[in-house]
Amino acid sequence: MSEFPPINAKLPVIWYGADYNPDQWLDRPDILAEDIRLMKEAGCNVLSVGIFAWSRLEPKEGVYCFDWLDRIFDSFEANGLYINLATPSAAYPLWLAEKHPEIVRVDAHRRRLRGRTRDNYCWTSPAYRKEVGRMDAELARRYAHRQNLVLWHVGNEYGGECHCELCQNAFRNYLKNRYNDSLDAVNKAWWTSFSSHLFTDWSQIESPSPVGESSIHGLNLDWRRFVTWQACQFIENELNSIRLFSANVPTTTNLTLGPDLDPYKIGSLFDVTSWDSYPTYHSPVGNIEVAEHQALLSDLTRAIKPNRPFLLMESTPSITHSQWAKLKRPGMHQVASLLMTALGSDSVMHFQWRKGRGGLEKFHGAIIGHDGDSRPRTFQEVKALGKTLQGLSDVVGSLVQPQAAVVFDWENRWALEDARCLTGSRSYWFDFVHPHHKAFFELGVATDVISQDMPVDSYKLISAPVLYLVKPGVAEKLKKFVRNGGTLILTFWSGIVDDSDLCYLGGAPGPLRELAGIWVEEIDTLYREDTNALRPCSGNALHLVGSFPVKTYCEVIHAEGAEVLAAYESDYYAGLPALTVNKYGKGKVYYLAANADAAFLNPFYARIALEAQIPFAVDGILPPGLIAKRRHANGTDFLFLLNFEHEPKSFDFGSERWIKLESHEVLSGTHSIPPYGAFVLKKVSS
Ligand code: GLA
Ligand code: ZN
């Protein structure tokens, strides 16, 4: 497939809008009317409505107040605006918690929280599922056939966990199912002979707690799996209730991609994936670093549902709620938003349309501020972006189609971040996954970000940094991938534990040892001040020359059939392999034993991508700060050139001819892309 139909045929353009809370302004019809006028002026076409509106939709049990929402649908319809209608499950009304105290979450300390009304409900409570199902079905029955309903926004940023008795029992049942009713199997999988942890009755098993058990890694891991599984059951209940009356309107939820729930499992329940992106541009780490983080999470969100676009559900037009509220500099909102489009988003949505007068988010970035004026720069930039996006309708449904993938697996994340190993504080995604993804990002090589469970057949190259936990069947899948001609990059600290978090016996990297053709004797964790270096062997097949610093992690490895491409420069393991390649079937496996930075990873991945014949977005080296991305649709190529820096960047199209979508200007030869500027182009067929 080379093109996907629009998310909803009613709105075959790039979706543009925001979270909209008319429920906070019901006593100000003048403001609601002004909202419509300004939305049209800004070029908005769809708004997300009702996300936390339960107490306005049903202020008392069974007393529905849908009239205000009816009026929103009516006025939107009269003005050509569409609605992404939310289920209000993320925030129950207080009367519901008073009626059913069991719906309120219990924290890991076993304290039942007070009825605070956001992201604070029990995943298991039958009463809450029933009430949510009832409310969702009411909404679906009433609004499914509205001309301007285009999407269901189910829940909001699902996350967190509950430790109540209902959840404890559900956890035990989950374990009985997973371990075929055998407590013996649980004891084995969790290595409970450690510190006298043997369980002799199911009732002794409880969720991990800072005031109780937290030292059994297998238990911790199974708890995390259970929480995701239970959240999926909760979500299925919402989806079933909606589909009773609204089977044909697509569904999504806005993923947070935080550590607590496995986004691959949550996202796959929906028709279209979406996520909320809150980058902190203009911070000391640099814009490319920030942009790459957003790209990584977009590549993940998109890959959950392959061969279709995703949606950017929230982004701030100005400031975030992070520690520093630095304003986006002129132009940054445009380039940051177009990066999402370049990566496959068919929307640019904001949080929030209008700043409320009170509450936690009254100063959070918004399209309309407390002045209610359209003159501020933020509004004017949102309006300009709306105009730009109107010119990009051809891009709708086009695909990214990466031939390379980076593995970022949540079960690996949970296990790795729980383990007492390596340095005391480390983050799988920040320290290990993102440097590898960043090399591809800067090179202009499209990547999916995938879990270890996902199919790999559509890729030519897979990078799986620090694949510490290897699940059953994964080594076999990777062997098949390489045997058939794929290129695999593995790094230090891989193949260490199985899916119960039990260490593999017989030498690292466990089930990947034969594939990598090496044996890991031990890993050295260096102090921050220490360095070693990796020196490519002369005449190595990748043509790498020089000396590249390596920091923090150095494995002492021995080749077992693999060819040595680089060796350590110093310390007692000087001369031992630091980088190897193993020919396996028709493919190759690279093993990088040490923690190298961009100075090595960029040329390394450039050579490997060339060797594996992976397409680059553009020929030649891009100037630093300029990012190139492509989307494809039925023989049409779209090119996005995005300048994340404050200086203009020069780009040479050579003899190729490209049309700028916004202005229809035809470009070839050398052009200058202004500071924070973006070109979106369509190739002129030769
Ligand atoms: C999240 C929520 C929004 C809002 C924003 C603020 O993304 O989904 O409702 O609270 O954070 O940044
Ligand atoms: Zn619970």
Image: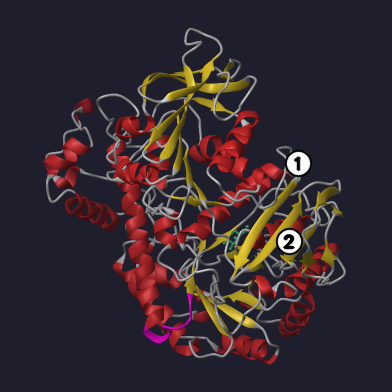
Q: Reading the chain from its start, which is encountered first: label 2 or label 1?
A: 2
Specify whether 448 is left or right of 369: left
Residue 251 visible in the current orientation: yes
For the residue carrying disc 1, how many other residues have a C-alpha within 10 Å: few (<14), some (14-19), or many (20+)? few
Residue 16 visible in the current orientation: no
Q: Which residue is mark 2?
A: 317
What is the three-letter code of the residue carrying label 1? Pro
What's the magenta region? 244-250
Q: Which mark is residue 382?
A: none
Q: CA distance from mark 2 to mark 1?
A: 25 Å
For the residue carrying disc 2, how many other residues have a C-alpha within 10 Å: few (<14), some (14-19), or many (20+)? many
Residue at 59%, 42% (x, y): give it: 610
Q: Which mark is residue 624?
A: 1
Answer with the quadrant where ligand 1 appears in the image.
Answer: bottom right
SS class of the residue under badge 2? loop
Magenta includes 246?
yes
Residue at 78%, 78% (x, y): give it: 38
